[in-house]
Amino acid sequence: MNSEVEARLWRALQDVEDPEIPISVVGMGLIVSLAYRPEERAVDLELTFTAMGCPAMDFIQDDIRERLLQEPEVGDVRIEVVWDPVWTRSRIREDARATMRSLGIVA
Amino acid sequence: MTPTEMTAEELAPRTEDEVRAHLAAGKLVEGLPHMSPEYLKGIRRILTVSADTELVSAPAYLRAAQHAPALNNFGSAISICQDELAHAHIGYRLLGDLGVDMPRLIYEREPAAFKYPYAFDVPLDSWHELVMANTLYDQAGFVLLSDVHRSSTFGPWKRALAKVDKEETFHLRHGRTWVKKLCADPEEKRRIQAAADWMFILTLEWFGLPDERKRHGIQLEYGFKGLSNDELRQEWMAAVVPFMDEVGIDVPAHHDAEAGRYVIDCPFPARFDSEEKRWRLEDGAITWDEVMTRWKGRGPMNEEYVARLQKGYKGRKRNVARRSEPTGTA
């Protein structure tokens, strides 16, 4: 049951795009971990960014919160920004990589 | 002879009829071999305005960025400045490809010769004014560049603008998110209103002379723009006025449902006091000739911003010249 909810939350996160390129935060490899706590109706996320100076940090977190709170089982979204593992291009998913190439962005 | 020493007539081999036929066949202009002298002069003009506007927004926004309420906000504002420099670089690099002496254009032009809108000559002195600039000025830039992206027949710029538009969207979001947040507090909202009071009308001017005074002719034919000045002004108001209504900020414009267009509710154009950052609406409307006199005279920050942008280049040039001077010892 928990795994079904978590699978749906992962799919929901695919709706959240990087503010500057049309790739989801999942495709970009920004989501390090996701755990649903049914007793608290809360989602615990570990999130990283491509750079510590990423100007879109607040926007991305706001968008993630807004999207996940649309899910009926979710009453709270708790985000922890982590820098380990270090984000590298290897975290970009293959389908996202193809989209970036089509936009002329080297990935 | 290098390209920068050649005239437009020497660089652009086609006739106007050949360019028109090329465009009528559904092709884009990809470089000098496809251009006529008129096309080359026109695209250079519009690229210069665009590049100058992006360039000056960097020192203008940097001035206000130091008022950021927190470190990560300062980082976001600096990132916006970085984007603007990159957008300027695209324009100047394309001008370089079209035979313009880039270093001379950027670093050796007199401040008053830069072609960015007058609005940037008025200093941004607070975080409130920065985010209002993102909301109003970046929206104006977005309207103008989206129009160019849609209508442009110059392939290299048309393709580059896809990415510029996406990055400008981030600037707009930055402005609107902050305006909404600040309007939730009465004192912050008062300061946002004060910023809108001088910046809204200044941005209305951004779109230039009204259509009855402006012949667009070749600009529209060659795709240098798609919409007229008044149409672009309407598009900007359509984007900005509903948002201002939503957050409760008063602006001197409203949508007239019967006329199907936005109407400006104050004397326009009007006299602007750049020292006080205040519109002297009590004087009534002025003429566009008076507006152009103000534009040509530039505003309070013109010399300082251009000096800042040119400082490194000029300093290095002086040092190189000094090192090349004979020492004069026997």
Image (tube, rainbow, N blue to C red):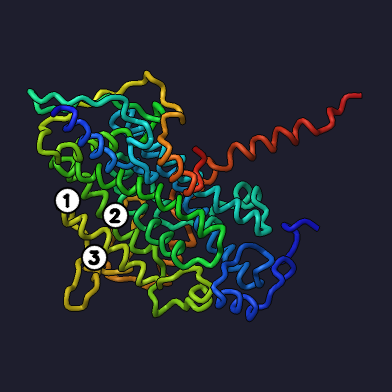
Q: From the viewer's perspective, is residue B327 above or below residue B93?
A: above
* Residue A88 vs residue B107, the one in the foreground: A88
Q: Amino acid at mark 1?
A: Val
Q: Secondary structure at mark 3?
A: helix
Determine if marks 2 and 3 fall on one subunit. yes
- The image shows residue B43 at horizontal and vertical percentages of 57, 65
Q: Name the chain under label 1.
A: B
Total labels drawn: 3
Name the residue tied to disc 1. B247
Verify CB contact (< 8 Å) between mark 1 and mark 3. no
Query: On the picture, is B89 further left or further right than B292?
Result: right
Query: Residue A102 bears which disc, if any?
Result: none
Query: On the picture, is B189 further left or further right than B283?
Result: left
Q: Amino acid at mark 3?
A: Glu
Q: CA distance from mark 2 to mark 3?
A: 14 Å
Q: Amino acid at mark 2?
A: Trp
Determine if marks 1 and 3 fall on one subunit. yes
Disc 1 or 3, which lies upstream in sequence?
1
Query: On the picture, is B316 further left or further right than B296?
Result: right
Disc 2 or 1, which lies upstream in sequence?
2
Determine if marks 2 and 1 fall on one subunit. yes
Q: Quick one: quadrant of the N terminus of chain B?
A: bottom right
Q: Residue at x 39, y 77 (%)?
A: B211
Q: Secondary structure at mark 2?
A: helix
Name the residue tied to disc 3. B282
Question: Can you tell which quarter of the image residue B323 is in?
Answer: top right
Name the residue tied to disc 2. B198
- The image shows residue B237 at horizontal and vertical percentages of 28, 63
Q: Nearer the viewer, mark 1 or mark 3?
A: 1
Q: Nearer the viewer, mark 2 or mark 1?
A: 1
Q: Name the chain under label 3.
A: B
Q: From the viewer's perspective, is residue A82 above or below residue B22?
A: above
